[in-house]
Image (cartoon, rainbow, N blue to C red):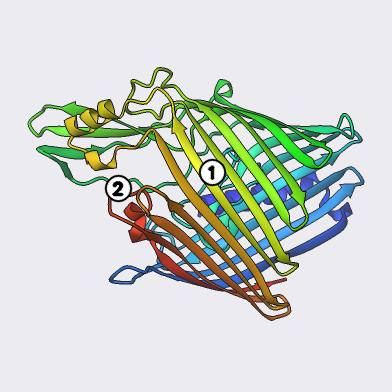
């Protein structure tokens, strides 16, 4: 409740600062919806069940200053992570300042980079919420507090600079067995980067065009949004393996391109991740690695399109036998040891059957284990501003495979949404 009151006061202060009574083109909108997300595994409990009200305020105080704010009031009966079923939290809330050569956006925001679909190696600013993938982007992507500067020095290229003073990680469930071999297991709280100015993250991207092709080059300096699980053994009265999630520093060098011809679009995106494990000998930190995506779009007509992609993950200075020995030492499943290279394919089908019905199907499959992820979404426009979303997040594969380990998170979702 204190957090909710604080957010309301912050919202009112911001509106007063912007002198909202004199705002131009001021509008108030948003949406309300009810949702039900039944788990697809026995005993088929609801992962989420409730309703949401989102309020959006936007407008401008002058020709060069705009503002936008969206706040969610979320009521979830099935949320076991908090004793309070009502949560109030900001989604986006920022100020835009426009000049001839520079645009600035300051506040809580989404910043998406990359040209490929669903899997984007250069898209490293906004974290993912892997516990809550559904139809609403604000559910599975997490907004960041940032200052974004867009420079337009010429018609040939533009520069984007992003400063992130507060680190935010991906939201990934951590589940460990109570025992590993003869050892009990203890999980410490995640060890986050210290909140200080010198730990700020930043990113820069050059966006340009050549005849027939758009491309960009990017660089990100900050922290890995996925944790590394460090462990040590305590030989006390009760021998334990103690695991501590930590977030290491990372530098990411990336690029992407897209070119079109007839009904086809060829896309590519790649990023080199330079981690703290420079020589590949620290088994608790991901090695330096390269991830790239090559994709092809085919537009059947204005109502249907298909995207196919090949994805490869390459680890450098990687010693798989050493990794296997270390996992065996700590009683961890050796079968889950990663390979030096990992390949997968993805597909995305979009189809608008009529003006009121659309279908989207996203799928990703790892080639070695044949484990896969499916995300079908059906959007039915019942009336003006009233939409029904139906779909599912489906994980399948062997228990020791990346997607197979997440079978327990497979669920359907039904959401009825009214926008105003």
Q: Nearer the viewer, residue 288 or 260?
A: 260
Residue furthest left in the image: 237
C-alpha distance separating marks 1 and 2: 20 Å
Q: Quadrant of the C terminus?
A: bottom right
The reply to whether residue 109 is in sight is no
Please name the residue shown 56% across and 39% down the image: 121
Task: Give the labeled residue for mark 2.
Answer: 175
Quadrant for residue 371, please give it: bottom left
Q: Nearer the viewer, residue 114 or 153?
A: 114
Please name the residue shown 30% across and 36% down the image: 188
Query: Residue 318: where, in percent of width, then height?
Result: 37, 26
Q: Is residue 44 above or below residue 237?
A: below
Q: Secondary structure at mark 1?
A: loop
The answer to whether mark 1 and mark 2 are in CB contact below 8 A is no
Q: Is residue 281 above or below residue 97?
A: above
Please name the residue shown 72% across and 35% down the image: 216
Left or right, 176 with reference to 384: left
Q: Nearer the viewer, residue 2 or 239?
A: 239
Mark closer to the chain start, 1 or 2: 1
Q: Secondary structure at mark 2?
A: loop
Query: Residue 61: where, in percent of width, then height?
Result: 87, 48
Query: Residue 152: where, in percent of width, then height?
Result: 85, 33
What label sits on residue 127 in the rendered view?
1
Q: Nearer the viewer, residue 350 or 331?
A: 350
């Amino acid at each position: 409740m204190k957090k909710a009151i604080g957010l309301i006061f912050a919202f009112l202060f911001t509106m007063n600062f912007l002198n909202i009574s004199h705002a131009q083109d001021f509008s108030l909108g948003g949406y309300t919806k009810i949702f039900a997300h039944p788990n697809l595994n026995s005993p088929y409990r609801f992962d989420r069940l409730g309703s949401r009200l989102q309020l959006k305020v936007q407008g401008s105080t002058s020709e060069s200053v705009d503002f936008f704010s969206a706040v969610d009031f979320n009521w979830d009966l099935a949320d076991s992570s908090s004793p309070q079923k009502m949560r109030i939290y900001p989604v986006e809330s920022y100020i835009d300042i426009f000049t001839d050569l520079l645009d600035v956006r300051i506040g809580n925001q989404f910043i998406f980079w990359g040209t490929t679909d669903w899997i984007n190696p250069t898209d490293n600013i906004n974290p993912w919420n892997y516990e809550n993938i559904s139809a609403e982007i604000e559910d599975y992507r997490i907004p960041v507090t940032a200052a974004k500067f867009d420079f337009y020095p010429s018609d040939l290229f533009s520069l984007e600079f992003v400063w992130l003073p507060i680190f935010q990680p991906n939201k990934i469930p951590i589940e460990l067995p109570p025992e590993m071999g003869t050892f009990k297991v203890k999980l410490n709280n995640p060890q986050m980067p210290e909140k200080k100015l010198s730990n700020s993250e930043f990113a820069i991207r050059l966006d340009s065009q050549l005849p027939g092709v758009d491309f960009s080059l990017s660089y990100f300096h900050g922290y890995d949004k996925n944790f590394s699980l460090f462990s040590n053994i305590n030989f006390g009265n009760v021998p334990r393996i103690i695991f501590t999630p930590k977030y290491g520093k990372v530098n990411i060098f990336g690029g992407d391109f897209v070119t079109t011809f007839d009904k086809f679009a060829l896309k590519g995106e790649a990023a080199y991740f330079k981690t703290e494990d420079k020589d590949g000998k620290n088994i608790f930190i991901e090695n330096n690695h390269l991830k790239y995506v090559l994709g092809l779009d085919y537009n059947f007509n204005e109502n249907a399109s298909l995207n196919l992609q090949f994805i490869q993950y390459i680890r450098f200075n990687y010693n798989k036998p050493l990794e296997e020995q270390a996992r065996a030492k700590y009683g961890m499943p050796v079968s889950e040891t990663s390979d030096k290279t990992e390949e997968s394919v993805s597909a995305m089908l979009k189809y608008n059957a009529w003006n009121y019905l659309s279908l989207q199907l996203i799928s990703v499959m790892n080639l070695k284990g044949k484990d896969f992820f499916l995300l079908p979404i059906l959007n039915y426009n019942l009336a003006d501003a009233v939409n029904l979303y139906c779909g599912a997040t489906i994980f399948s594969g062997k228990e020791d495979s990346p997607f197979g380990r997440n079978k327990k998170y497979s669920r359907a979702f039904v959401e009825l949404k009214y926008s105003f």
